[in-house]
Amino acid sequence: MNNRYIKAQAPATSVEWVRNPDWLPLPTFAPSDNRIAVLIAVVEGVLNYTTIAGGAGAAASTVYWGDGTSTLTNGTYQTKEYIYSAITGTVSVDEFGRNYKQVIMDIIIPASSTLVRLERTGTGIYRNKPSHYLDFKCQSNTLNTLDLFFDRNAPYLEKLDVSGCTVSGVYGLTNITKSRYIRSLAFNKNITSSLASFCAYQQMIEDFGDFTTSSSNISGFFNSSNIKTVGNITANSTLDLGSLFFSSDVRQVGNISAPSCTQAYRLFRDAVNLTKIGTLNLPLVTTLQEAFYNTNIEEIVFTSSCALITNVTSAFVTYNLKRLVTPNLTRGVSIPYANMTAAALNEFFTSLGTATGAQTITITGNPGSLTCNTSIATAKGFTVVT
Amino acid sequence: MTEGFYKQDDSGEWYFAPNGVYSPTYSLTKENKDSLQLPIDGWDWYNEAPEAYLIWTQRPIE
């Protein structure tokens, strides 16, 4: 188990994860396979187990445990305990100095099966004990539920690949997020179901590259994670960008295009190291409450109309702001003690639409607050506070 | 220095303008304040921040 970070779905232009050469290779899947393969370490002197739940009868999956035994799923949770001494194969040593052997759990999923769970909570002595998944791959075009309850019980997992799960083929991928050792992550951009909080709390993935997704919900995707850079985000079907980067360590993000999104509450809130983002295409968004609050962002430029936005509460309270362009915005905003020159403020005023009722813009403490042309805004019905 | 124009709107939110307030129908500046019949549109001049404003600024932000 090495400790180098990786890029998720990115070209090899930086340090990349290298699979441990001692590990057994996962089987190669045929294009028609509905299948899961998991490399599992069987560690000497500790409990080694995995718990699975799958369909029953005609929907039963065949589970080859990897130690020569197998079972059919039966609609209940089934736990397999691996006995180190009974496993054949080479003994390796992990980074903690422990001897381990390896098995590959291979799950053959019938076309009629729609649910597979790898359940974190076994029962009795297995409950909440960590399993030793190292490398996980799933391919299916029939599954609509794949629950990976890895939030505390797969701490050694380094690679997760569900890129072979097609549209709506994967669902409920919300509990992977606390497998903190994950360094290689691949999922299918055509997944339409929720990816909410999928990479939340991740510690090892720093550079995500471009993020293209068809998911309906990517709220909290990078919440509280150690992510540093993300390329362009293209999320044409996403309705919810709430808390996408909330309290993360993100520094730079590319252009964000989510033409179906209606809410971006706390989009970047408390991402205190964020300085640069690209342009924003969010024509249907209605709330930007706290979206950029407590960041160090320098420029916020919308290329889409902001006419539908009704909530900008504390949206732009960020003290390094040098440029703000919000075409057709009709609501007052507060940008006190930011870093906007008179020219930047005039540009911002020019971008505004007509105020909806009584609307106040606060620009106190900006370098240009006393020399900008407030009449640009007052002519549109805004009151400007300096 | 906390002198300036203060206003509390109907929702309870406070505004503080240390220099001026510019609206479509009036302009309030610290230079012309003495010639104004305040309050105007809820704006009033205070030589020090009013206590209600100070209390509001200490409210927790979730």
Image (cartoon, coloured by chain):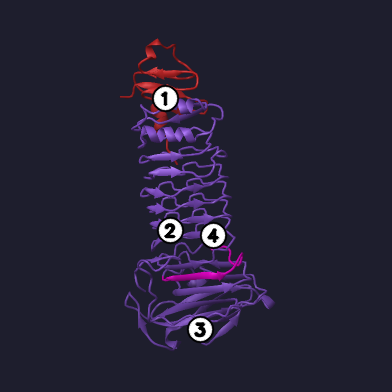
Check if mark 4's residue and mark 2's residue have beta carbons within 8 Å: no
Q: What residue would you read off at disc 4? A: A213
| Secondary structure of residue under mark 2 | loop
Disc 2/disc 1 C-alpha distance (Å) = 40 Å
Magenta segment = A156-173
Q: Colour of chain B?
A: red
Q: Amino acid at mark 3?
A: Gly
> Which mark is nearer the camera, 1 or 4?
4
Q: Quadrant of residue A152?
A: bottom left
Chain of the residue under the numbered disc 3 shown in the image: A
Residue B49 at x, y percent in the picture: 36, 23
Q: Is residue A142 shown above or below B44?
A: below
**Is label 3 in a helix, a strand or a loop?**
loop
Above or below, A261 against A187 in this view is: above
Residue found 54% across the figure and 51% down from its top:
A258
Q: Which residue is mark 1?
A: B52
Label 1 with label 4: CB-CB less than 8 Å: no
